[in-house]
Amino acid sequence: MSQIMDVFKLLTLTYPRYDDSRSREVIEEVGMELIRRDEIRGTDSGPTGETKLGVTEQILGWLSNEVGHLSKHGSST
């Protein structure tokens, strides 16, 4: 899980550095693939013996935290 979240953090740090839409789309695709792979863990279509790690939940928690920070900064200006 920590490796997946490290990759996600790297994606979020590099995303704003790209001006072209194709590069941003690729970063979005990688993020979605991280989520998709975790969502199939523990199912019949997923790898045998693996369980879901909760990547979606971790990312949603991170997004919630980021939105909270942005809304606090926006309301004070």
Image (cartoon, rainbow, N blue to C red):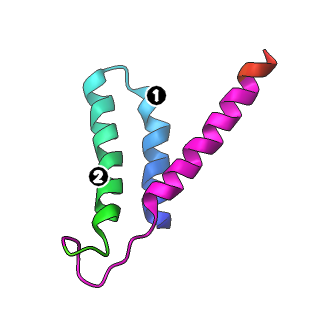
Bin the neighbour count of mark 1 within 10 Å (Cα to Cα): few under 14, some 14-19, many 20 and up: few
Label 2 vs 1, first from the N-terminus: 1
Question: Looking at the picture, how far across and down is residue 32, in whole percent?
Answer: 32, 47
Residue at 28% x, 42% y is 29
Provide the secondary structure element on which disc 1 rests: helix
Is 70 covered by the magenta stretch?
Answer: yes
Helix, strand or loop: magenta stretch = helix
Task: Name the residue tied to disc 2.
Answer: 33
Give residue 36's quadrant in the image: bottom left
Q: Nearer the viewer, mark 2 or mark 1?
A: 2
Q: Is residue 69 shown above or below 48?
A: above
**Which residue reaches farthest right?**
76
Of residue 43 and residue 49, the one placed in the foreground of this image is: 43
Mark 2 vs 1: CB contact within 8 A: no
Give residue 49's quadrant in the image: bottom left
Label for residue 16?
1
Q: Which residues are magenta?
A: 45-73
